[in-house]
Image (cartoon, rainbow, N blue to C red):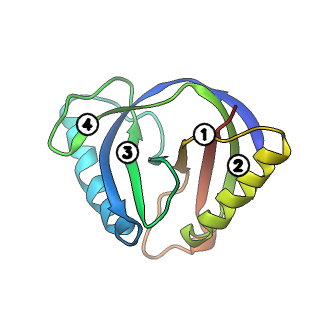
């Protein structure tokens, strides 16, 4: 993990697929979402402005309330499962996790401990930005995931 930092972020429109999904079904949810998002976005002439992300509402327990997609240059019109969303404007604690997705839970826990150590408190919404695109033949150690925890 990189050293955590505090960053002010601006709101950004997004194109997303939303769901409340059992944690065990997250890989299938991501696969389905990322199979429909590119065509829906391109079909509207909307431009993707950054890497894929997943925004979670509330703690990740047996189920996850999330939306996954891409930041865009403007709002999309609903198209099947693809809807408009937004990443919020806020102050976040940010860190980059290096390694497989299996290590994300521990990385989030360490970021939460760092936030508490700064005398801050995390909110109910948090998101991951997938800086490297996973592929079946890659070494999971090469994955980079940016963790963003809004703080007050």
The residue indicated by pointer 2 is 95
Quadrant holding the N terminus: bottom right
SS state under label 4: strand
Describe residue 77's horizontal placement relative to residue 34 as left or right: left
Whichever of labels 1 and 3 marks the residue nearer the N terminus, that label is: 3
Distance CA(mark 1)–CA(mark 3): 21 Å
Quarter of the view holding residue 13: top left
Pick the residue in front: 142 or 121: 121
Residue identifier under label 4: 83
Quadrant for the C terminus, please: top right
Q: Are marks 1 and 3 in contact (CB under 8 Å)?
A: no
Query: Marks 3 and 4: CB-CB under 8 Å?
Result: no
Q: Closer to us: mark 3 or mark 4?
A: 4
What residue sits 50% from the left and 48% below the top? 58
| x then y, percent, for residue 78 | 19, 33
Residue 134 lies, in percent from the top left, at 47, 64
Kindly state the secondary structure of the residue where label 2 is placed.
strand
Q: Give x and y (percent) for residue 15.
A: 33, 37
Earlier-in-chain disc, 1 versus 2: 2
Rendered position, 16 above or below 138: above
User: Which numbered mark, 1 or 3, is in the foreground of this view?
Assistant: 1
Give the Cα distance between marks 3 and 2. 20 Å
How far apart marks 1 and 2 lie (CA) works out to 16 Å
Residue bearing mark 3: 69
């Amino acid at each position: 993990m990189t050293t955590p930092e505090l960053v002010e972020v601006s709101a950004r429109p997004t194109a997303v697929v939303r769901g409340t999904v059992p944690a065990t079904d997250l890989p299938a949810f991501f696969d389905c979402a990322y199979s429909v998002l590119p065509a829906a976005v391109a079909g509207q002439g909307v431009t993707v402005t950054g890497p894929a992300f997943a925004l979670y509402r509330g703690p990740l327990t047996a189920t996850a309330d999330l939306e996954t997609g891409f930041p865009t240059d403007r709002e999309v019109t609903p198209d099947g499962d693809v809807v408009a969303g937004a990443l919020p404007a806020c102050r976040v604690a940010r860190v980059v996790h290096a390694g497989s997705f299996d290590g994300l839970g521990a990385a989030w826990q360490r970021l939460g401990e760092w936030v508490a150590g700064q005398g801050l408190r995390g909110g109910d919404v948090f998101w991951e930005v997938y800086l490297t695109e996973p592929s079946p033949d890659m070494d999971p150690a090469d994955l980079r995931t940016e963790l963003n925890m809004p703080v007050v």
